[in-house]
Image (spheres, rainbow, N blue to C red):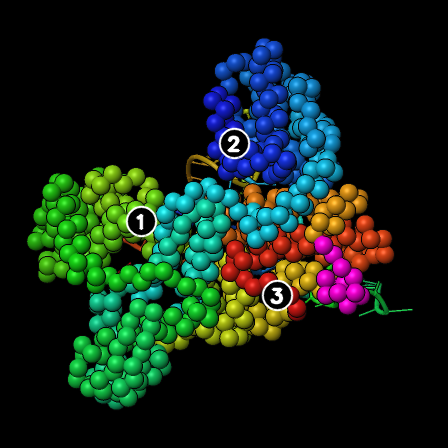
Amino acid sequence: MTYLHLGNHFCDNPFQLNHSLSGHFFPMKPQIIELLSAAVATLQDDGVLPSELSVSIQVENTRDKAHGDLATNLALMLAKPAAKNPRELAQLIVNALPVSALVEKTDIAGPGFINFYLSDASTQALVTQVIEQGERYGHNSTGAGRLVQVEFVSANPTGPLHIGHGRGAAVGDSICRLLEATGWQVTREFYYNDAGAQINNLALSVQARCQGLTPDDERWPEDGYRGEYIVELADSFMRGDTVQSEDQQFTGTGNADDLEAIRHFAVAYLRREQDLDLKAFDVNFDVYFLESSLYDDGKVDAAVERLIANGYTYEDGGALWLRTTDFGDDKDRVMRKKDGGYTYFVPDVAYHLDKWQRGFARVVNEQGADHHSTITRVRAGLQALQADIPTGWPDYVLHQMVTVMRGGEEVKISKRAGSYVTLRDLIDEVGRDATRYFLVARKADSQLTFDIDLARSQSSDNPVYYIQYAHARVCSIFRKLAEQSGSWHVSDGLAALSSLALDAEKDLVVLLGRFPEVVNNAAAQHEPHQVANYLRELAGDFHTYYNSEKTLVDDSEVRNARLTLAYAVRQVLANGLTLLGLTAPEVM
RNA sequence: GCGCCCGUAGCUCAAUUGGAUAGAGCAUCGCCCUUCUAAGGCGAGGGUUGCAGGUUCGAACCCUGCCGGGUGCGCCA
C-alpha cells in the first residue's frame, strides 16, 4: 500500500526518491498517485471537495485484467466528505486528471473504482529500466545506510541445528537480504549462552561418555543429553582433536576428569558443527555474541545497578525484583535469585542495551514463538533503564513450530531423547534450495508441516524448481540463439521494444513492474514469503507465455523485442531468488 | 484459568494489510512433445473463509462472544 497524505503533501513511499530521474516513468504507482493528487487539488480549488482533507490515496494492482492495470478506490473514500455518489465523483476525478503519457485510458467501474490502463510507452520504459538497473532492479534506498542488526538462529551449543533453527536461519537471512536491498546496513548476529546450566548439563553428558557410561547406567547424569553426537564428541575430546569454529578454537585434553576442558571443547565442537550446517545452508554471520562476555565485561552488573538506581526494583523474599508491571507485564519478575544468580532475562536486557549503544537504529530479533514471553520483559527492562530507547524497540519476528513428517508420522524433535531430524539431514535429503524455499515461502507466524518424504520422493515437483526452471529456460533460449549463430545486443533489443504487441507480453511487463513494491513491502513487514509468492506468479506467467509464443522467430524486430523481454524476466527472477537465498541455475 | 499466534478447496499454503467473481501447488480426471528444455502448458471438478452477531458503500481481514489447534504463564534458559 502506498500512501500520500494530501494535507501536507508528504509522501512516505520509498519510490519518491526516484521521481527526480527525468525520462523514467517508473515505478508506476507513485506516478498514478501524483496524477490523482493533482486531480484532488483541482477539485478542491473548484470547491467540489472540501479544502481540509486527510485521506491517503491508495492505488492497487488489479486482480482481474478486466479492471485495467492499476486501480484506485479514491472516489469511494471521498464520496462521503464530498457528499456525492461515488461514481459521479469518480467521473469528476477522471475529468480533472492531468494528461500523462503513462496512461492509455481510464474507466469507471463497479461501485466507483477508477481503473487505469497503462500505455505501450510505459511498458517499454519499464523493460528498459529493468535492464538498465540489472541486479539493483527492485532495490531502493529507504534505509539510507542506517544500521540495522538482525539477530537470528542464536541456538545454544548443546546440539546440532534442527529444522526449527533452519526456519529461523532461512527467514532471518532473507530478511537481512531484503533490508540490504532497501538500503540498510545489516549486521547478522548470532547470540548464544556458553556458560549456563544447559551447558553444564552438556559437559556432564560428554564427561559421562568419556568415562564409558551409557544412558542406561545408574551414574548417567539426570536429564543428560543422550544423542549419538555426544558419543562422537566424547571420542573426539579423548583423541585430543583440535576444533575450530567461526568464533571458537579448542583442543581436547583427553582427560575425562577435567570437566572445564570438556565444557570448552564441547562448546567449540558443537559451534563448529552448527557452522558447517549454516554454511551448507549458505547462511553467514558477522558477529557471534557470547552471553558470558556480558558478565566478563561487567555489562550485566552495570545494567542491574542502573535499574536499581532508576527505582524500578525492590527486594522481596530474599530476591531482587523488577517492576515490569510498570511497562505492561502482567506480573513483576525476579532479577536476582535468592542464591545470588541472575535470571535469564537480565543478561538479555544488558545485551539489548549493548545493541542500542552500538548504534543500531533498528534491531530485528528472529526467534521461535515459544520464546515470545521474553519480548515484554526485555522491552520493559530497556524502558526501565531510561536510556531513551523507543518503546517498541526492538522488533521481533516470531516463527511458529515446524512439524516434521516422515513415513506419514510426525517425527518428534527431542534433543535429550536423541531422536530428531537435523538441518543437515534435510539439506542432504531434500537439497539446500528446496529446504530453504519451503521454510521461507510461508508466513512465519503460521505453523508449517515439512513432509520429508514428499520433499524427497517428489523433488521434481518442488515449487522452487518451477521458479528456477523459468530462469533456466530463459538462459536456454539465449544458448539456442548462439547455436543458431544469432546475436542480440541490449541497444538493438531496447530499440525494438515497440514490437511487443501481445497482451501476454504487456501483462508480463506490468508484473515485472510490481517487483520493487513487493521487495519494499516484504522488507518493511519482514515477510520474505511475499517474494516467494511473487516469484511463483512471475514464473507461472512466463511459462505460459513461453508455451504460447516462440521467442526465436524469423522477424528480427519481434525476435529482439522478445529476447529483451525474456532477459528482463530472467533478471527479475534472479533478483528475487537471490533475496530468498536461492540459486538461479542457468541449466537444469 | 489468563496472555500471544493460528483456523481459507481432500492436503500444503496465498490473498498486494478493508476492495470488484477468495487464488496457486499437490492429489483426481481429460488434452498438448517433429516446434527455443514436458522440472512445462491448456482445460474440468473441488468453498457458507471454524460458528454466531456487529461496524460500512464493501469483511477471509476490523470489534464482541463462543468452538477447535498450537504455544507461553519457574527464583529454568
Residue beneath disc 3: A585
- Classify residue A417 by image quadrant: bottom left
Question: Disc 1 marks which amino acid?
Answer: Ile
Q: Are marks 3 and 1 in contact (CB under 8 Å)?
A: no
Chain letter of disc 2 in the image = A
Q: Are marks 1 and 2 in contact (CB under 8 Å)?
A: no
Q: Is residue A428 left or right of residue A393?
A: right
Residue beneath disc 2: A3
- In terms of secondary structure, where does tag 3 sit? loop
Q: Residue A32: say if magenta.
A: no
Labels 1 and 2: the sequence-earlier one = 2
Over which residues does the magenta segment extend?
A478-489
**Residue A190 - label:** none
> Do the dots labelled 1 and 2 sit on one chain?
yes
Question: In this rendering, which labeled residue sits more in front, label 3 or label 2?
Answer: 3
**Residue A375 - label:** 1
- Whether residue A459 appears in this view of the structure is yes
Q: Residue A488: say if magenta.
A: yes
